[in-house]
Amino acid sequence: MAVSRLNQVRQEIAKVIVGQQDVVDGVLICLLSAGHVLLEGVPGLGKTTLLRTLARALNLKYSRIQFTPDLMPADIVGSMIIEHDERGQKALRFQPGPIFANLVLADEINRATPKTQSALLEAMQERTVTSGTTTHELDPPFLVMATQNPIEMEGTYPLPEAQLDRFLMKILVTYPSRDELSKIVDRTIQTGEPRVDPVLDRDVILEVRSVCRQVLVAPHVQDFAIRLVMATQPEQAEAHEMASKYIRYGSSPRGAQALVECGRVLALMRGRFHLSIDDMRHVAASVLRHRIILNFDAHADGQTPDSILAAIIQGVLRQASAA
């Protein structure tokens, strides 16, 4: 039942979004893993449209925050306002900000100051907002999809590594192929706008989320996640030669947790109730690319997190098949 429902969601999104299947699946995986997702890509690739379409298909409350250098924390979480009652008496009331939604798009997150970024990231981690002495709970499911532009360097405040680690996945949004671009232009020419029907609701999403947590994890599969994370840590004896040469700091333990959590959701989406090594291999780059910090030699030799991770994943896969 869960698999068919998730396929329906994919079909509804495909009415609006052409291609980008890995991006769509990644956002769904993060939603069902109770995590958050960071999307990196140049403007105009459909990042904003994706989350708005997802909100319609899942019948969830959606909000969008455009991050700018003058954005304040209160513009995100909300603020206390003075109200007058019928007798003219004044009272303070909390006015919730746009963070109080199920799907929150943090557009161009790297354009806001660190103080504002931290206000958002605190809400992401704790799933609460504190105003004065009162703590307000955020309704589940709660997903933050942050976007950042790789080519816009001036006037940006890159997310610190410790805050990047809070995102379950970092997904790279690439240019469409020739056929996909042709379909996009065809849809632009059409007069009618595609209608997206709601196929899931909040209760069903929370139910599917609980089913994902019951996906079985065999000891050798769990060991693969641990080996993979330790292979990225240059100071470990198990470190891959590429990690020793090019990585300054490897993945934190959150990387191993994310591999298992995301892999379980993907296994369920593929119609299985047990996690496989291939499920984790499929999500490994998205889960780990923002959790490793490269050294100067890597930049000098033209290495990227993805090229290094590809070599490390292949090395750990060979070890796992030989064991």
Image (tube, grey):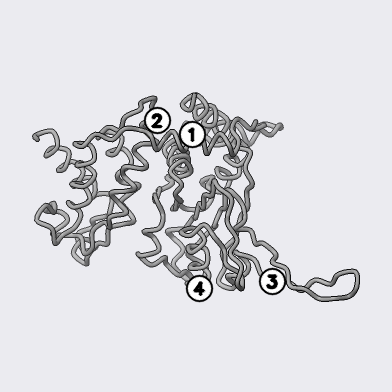
Q: Residues within 10 Å of mark 2 (few under 14, many from 20)?
A: many
For the point 11% across and 52% down, the residue is: 238
Closer to the camera, 149 or 313? 313
**Residue placed under numbered mark 4 in the picture:** 115
**Residue placed under numbered mark 2 in the picture:** 268
Which-is-in-front pick, marks 1 and 4? 1
Task: Return the x and y of residue 4 as percentages of the image width and height.
Answer: 50, 24
Q: Residues within 10 Å of mark 3 (few under 14, many from 20)?
A: some
Mark 2 is on which residue type? Leu
Q: Quadrant of the C terminus?
A: top left
**Residue placed under numbered mark 1 in the picture:** 208
User: What's the CA distance linking mark 2 and mark 1?
Assistant: 9 Å
**Residue placed under numbered mark 3 in the picture:** 80
2 and 1 marks in contact (CB < 8 Å)? yes
User: What's the CA distance linking mark 1 and mark 4?
Assistant: 35 Å
Q: Which of marks 4 and 1 precedes in the sequence?
A: 4
Mark 3 is on which residue type? Met
Which-is-in-front pick, marks 4 and 3? 3
Q: Which of marks 2 and 3 precedes in the sequence?
A: 3
4 and 3 marks in contact (CB < 8 Å)? no
